[in-house]
Image (tube, rainbow, N blue to C red):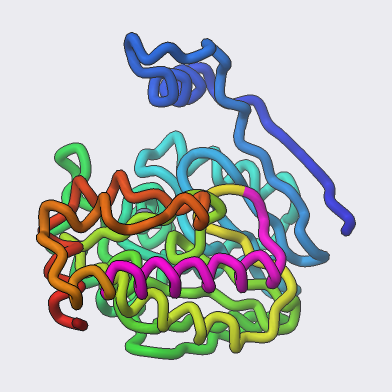
Amino acid sequence: MFRKILAIAAPLTVAALIVSAQAPAGGGGKGKAAPPPTIVQIKPGLYEIEGLGGNTSVRVSNEGVFVADTKNMGEENYQQLLTLIKSVTPQPIKGAAVTHVHQDHSGNTASFIRDGVPVWAHEGEKALTATYVTNGNKVGAPDKTFAKDQTITMGNAKIELHNYGPTHTSGDTIVYFPDLRVVHGGDMIVNNAPNCDFANGGSVVNWAKAMDEVLKLDFDTLIPGHGAVMTKAQVAEYAAKWKTFAERALAEVRKGTAKEALVAAIKVDDLAPFATASYAQRLDGFWADLQKAK
Ligand SMILES: [Zn+2]
């Protein structure tokens, strides 16, 4: 696979922020600075930007650029994102989508809209922007929404948006580039331990089912919300782990395992990188999700 890597030096203030975010006081970090954000060609006409929050996909058509996920909130992050995109194409940005409400994906929705770029999201994401607060800030609402499936045509590029019900939150979007056979997964598909935001409408039970829908798409490459790019075989493996995890959790509630004993009872050592720490912290939501389905 042809991969071209370009990196730009992060302005000092942003670099300092990244370092402090990754090396908490007394955390025993190795003092290694975060690498500067990079833009990498995944296929002709498609780039990925890692760093500054969740992974971003950049689809370059002959009539403009479409951006999937907008990085951590903040004007400096937004300007760095624009600079990286300009380093690979003179085309103007003409559309964007955010996969879900978390600010490391939706943080610069308002900046794109301010600059005249329409931003798409699932209607559930828009609803969550009314209540979602991060560090005292609210993320901007998208100006374009869809209910289930949406196709966008930009020059020679097609972009499909799909929602498969509640998964990581109650407003997740899968962005699909069918002509390139690439999926942008948001946090529904991550290349590390997934976590479910029950407070913002997520569902472990539906997530396992939704993965079957993702696998029906014709793709060979997936850009996850976090972590390294995945093959379809790796996504299938991830989907199988979701199914096993949800089945094991449901089996516990069906046989009457007490709420307090639930998380420890679910075997995950053969499902790495799946882990249960986040479920212990969100036990009420996890329990309620399983009770609805048992
Ligand atoms: Zn997220």
Image position of 135 (left or right of 219): left
Residue 294 showing in the rendered view: yes
Q: Nearer the viewer, residue 208 or 52?
A: 208
Residue at left offset 33%, top offset 12%: 25
Residue at left offset 19%, top offset 46%: 281
Q: Quadrant of residue 259?
A: bottom left
Q: Position of residue 209 (x, y in %)?
A: 41, 83
Residue 125 showing in the rendered view: no
Q: Position of residue 47 (x, y in %)?
A: 70, 57
Q: Position of residue 212 (x, y in %)?
A: 51, 84
Q: For ligand 1, give the image quadrant.
A: bottom left
Q: Main secondary structure of the magenta part?
A: helix
Image position of 223 (left or right of 43): left
Q: Which residues are magenta?
A: 228-250
Which quadrant would the N terminus be assigned to in this image? bottom right
Q: Position of residue 234 (x, y in %)?
A: 66, 65
User: Is residue 241 within the magenta segment?
Assistant: yes
Q: Quadrant of residue 250?
A: bottom left
Image position of 278 (left or right of 261): right
Which quadrant would the C terminus be assigned to in this image? bottom left
Residue at left offset 19%, top offset 74%: 255
Picture layout, residue 177 above or below residue 69: below
